[in-house]
Image: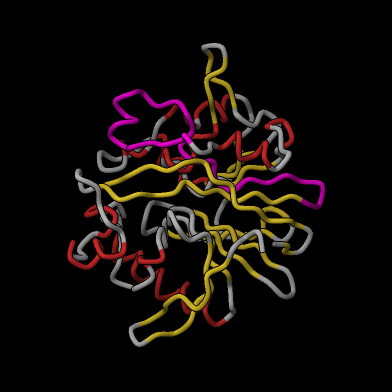
Amino acid sequence: MKIGPYALSSIETGTFALDGGAMFGVVPWVFWSKTNPPDERNRVTLAARCLLLVGDNRVVLIDVGNGTKFTDKQKDIFRLDNSKNDLMSSLRAHGIHPADVTDVILTHLHFDHAGGSTRIEQGRLVPSFPNARHYVQREHWNLSQHPTERDRASFMNNDFVLLNERGLLYLVDGEQEILSGIRVLVTNGHTASQQLPLISDDTTSLLYACDLIPFTSHLPYPYVMGFDVRPLVTLEEKKKILPRAQENNWILFLEHDPHVEAVTLKQVDKGIGVDQFVRMSE
């Protein structure tokens, strides 16, 4: 897929699993289990899908997946599976070396979005993309440095503190165009100042939906994650952004849906639903 100067590619970095009840909040098991069947520990499968943009003399990554720094206990808890692909192998398949990456847009700093920012090399923690500027919303960075008890488990300092120490961190203030043709929208329901990249040209727009819409099954307005710190804010953000996306025929890129990369939208009886499934390679 091409938008403006950029060739866009989906980057698969493996899968993991989280509690199904937490993924769907107040929605009863009898409903969400039909679309997202849980395992014997009530966990549902999530993709850790990133987006690669190449063009305009830049190599841009949006989010970087879980990474590979987890302990055996954490691997069991989150059912982490990199057996088919990980971030680096998927980038190599596209001819990208870590040193080639010029920009990393981190939607937020939860471990499943920022974990791949650093890696262990010869026993030392190093930046995965040593030449890249890493974009994070300032308000969200401040939260990551002083998380609440509710947020604390989602942040792993070895994912992102090193970026600041190495001068690779660039703090963004609010909604703005951060690279040519790439604007970020800011939402606050899931966490403070999650930034959703919107890539646009004169004919096509793609919104990286991140944790506003993790699965296609989260398109109905009441389907809001229990992980969200402000679920009623998420509800209002969905009511604002989804009709805008439908009216303007935006493509929604889905970071966590294990089966669907992207969709376009249509109006349905109770809100917004899937119009067409989109493959990034087409």
Place of residue 4 in the rendered image (x, y in percent of width and height, measured from the top left): 76, 64
Image position of 23 (left or right of 68):
left
In the displayed orientation, state which residue is furthest to the right. Answer: 57
In the displayed orientation, state which residue is furthest to the bottom. Answer: 269
User: Which is nearer the eye, 91 or 109?
Assistant: 91
Place of residue 234 in the rendered image (x, y in percent of width and height, measured from the top left): 35, 64
Label count reads 0
Reply yes or no: does residue 237 show up in magenta: no
Image position of 275 (left or right of 222):
right
Image position of 118 (left or right of 215):
right
User: Which is nearer the eye, 234 or 60?
Assistant: 60
Reply yes or no: does residue 66 show up in magenta: yes
Relative height, residue 184 to residue 203 (above, below): above
Tell me the quadrant of the picture where the N terminus can be found: bottom right
What residue is rendered at 49% in x and 33% in y? Answer: 67
Place of residue 130 in the rendered image (x, y in percent of width and height, measured from the top left): 67, 28
User: Which is nearer the eye, 138 or 4?
Assistant: 4
Q: Which residues are magenta?
A: 55-83
